Image (tube, coloured by chain):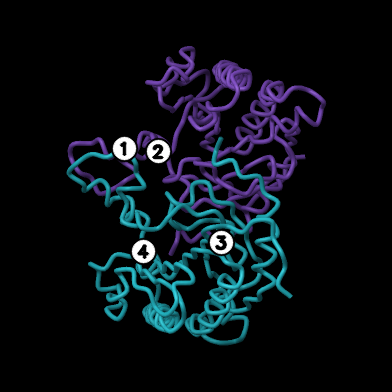
Chain colours: A purple, B cyan
Amino acid sequence: MKPKFKRVPKHIGIIPDGNRRWAEQQGMPKESGYSHGIDPGLALYETCVELGIPEVTFYGFTQDNTKRPSAQKLAFQQACIDAVNLLSNRDASLLVIGNTESPQFPKELLPYTVRQTFGKDLIKINFLVNYGWKWDLANGLKSEKPRDDIHKTIASRDISRIDLIVRWGGRRRLSGFLPVQSIYADFYVVDDYWPNFDRSHFYDALKWYDEQDITLGG
Amino acid sequence: MKPKFKRVPKHIGIIPDGNRRWAEQQGMPKESGYSHGIDPGLALYETCVELGIPEVTFYGFTQDNTKRPSAQKLAFQQACIDAVNLLSNRDASLLVIGNTESPQFPKELLPYTVRQTFGKDLIKINFLVNYGWKWDLANGLKSEKPRDDIHKTIASRDISRIDLIVRWGGRRRLSGFLPVQSIYADFYVVDDYWPNFDRSHFYDALKWYDEQDITLGG
């Protein structure tokens, strides 16, 4: 049953962690976890559309992550490609953001680095692929004309401020996730692994968010 | 009794929130809470020295905070002045960081904006005063020679990477606290208000940190 909320966040960040720990728990090699993270992503997309949440950003993989063993790297790259392709068959405007100048960025995702709407424009989805917080923030340092507003200078400037971050897998840290957009975000941690995604996890996060006092640092 | 830990963080960030809510709970005006946050700061300093923690950063007040009613602003400015003066009678190297070009920065704290050692050099203490994340990050944008490493360009570049952030007052958000240094930090929230500080809160945070798997995004 879909619960009711006084207010829902305008923009939610999703850190889908715990794929490797989930695989190990199942007695499978670590890299097998990532493909089990795709269906949860689609279920989350559907839940957001039902609730009228206007924007969601998924933490796909980072430049830090690409230092992992090659089997894992290939597996999470493929999972991101598959997830984005599946979402392009739904109703959403899609944008992939990350460092495209590195060979770690999957070529298959280049067409999505300019925002495109597929089907009905029901929700904005951003997907971070080969993203790096240093890469993101350093973008402004390269700019020739100095600017005051850091948000307008970063590589991810097309992604808006985030209200709520939900992280699966029990860890209470941001791990480089969009530092500028996350400044005032409320941070909710689900103790279960991402491949065990259940709508109730997400509803619990939204219920908790509903009770928070929003001050934007004031 | 002082508990034992396998490892303690090298650098801890402290967000001492809940002073106003504590005051209201006591039937006092909101601004009365801040002066009750000074003794907890000294107790925390002593605990860190006992445990051999080499660096602590306190979130004093922010540029966002200065938009609050004047009675509150005066009270938290005074509490920061008093706290820094008291710490200068202990054994620590002290550094105050914030936007000194604004009238909101207390003149009394200007001598501390260059790191100074008082007594024995037992711990590095950083105190954020009239700090703003936009101010901090925009510093690099003003630089004439472009740099790759954002940490070297920010106004708070003398503050190192943070391992653990402990926030009192129940809110699960960073509220602009040192975004670059907090990228990989583990984040622990104490549900009690800061003026109710008890060493057990801090020990619980360290016990929790002791069980975390440190990956630095890898």
Residues tagged by mark 1 and mark 2 found on one chain of the structure: no
Q: In which quarter of the image is the N terminus of chain B?
A: bottom right
Task: Please check whether the numbered discs 3 and 1 fall on a single chain.
Answer: no
Q: Which of marks 3 and 2 is in front?
A: 2
Q: Which of B36 and A213 is in front in this view?
A: B36
The chain that hosts pointer 1 is B
Q: Mark 4 lies on which chain?
A: B
The spot of residue B86 in percent (x, y) is: 44, 84
Separation (CA) of disc 3 from disc 1: 37 Å
> Where, quadrant-wise, is the C terminus of chain B in this rendering?
top right
Q: How far apart are marks 3 and 2 (CA)?
A: 31 Å
Residue B77 is left or right of residue A173, and the answer is left
Position in image of residue A215 (x %, y %): 48, 61
> Could you say which is closer to the camera, residue A54 or residue A73?
A73
Residue at (34, 44) in percent of width and height: B150
| Cβ–Cβ under 8 Å for marks 4 and 1 | no
Q: What residue type is labelled 1?
A: Asp
Residue B131: which disc? 4
| Residue B123 in sight from this viewpoint | yes
Asked if the residues shown at circle 1 and circle 2 are in contact, with their CB atoms under 8 angstroms apart, the answer is yes
| Disc 4: CA contacts within 10 A as few (<14), some (14-19) or many (>=20) | many
Contact (CB < 8 A) between labels 4 and 2? no
Q: Mark 2 points at which residue?
A: A134
Mark 3 vs 2, N-terminal side? 2
Q: Which of marks 4 and 3 is in front?
A: 4
- Residue A25 position, x and y percent, is 80, 31
Is residue A94 toward the left or the right of residue B131 in the image? Answer: right
The three-letter amino acid code for the residue at tag 4 is Tyr
Residue highlighted by disc 3: A213
Residue at 82% x, 25% y: name it.
A27
Compared across the picture, whether B103 is left or right of A97 comes to left
Among all residues in the image, which is located at the extreme top? A108
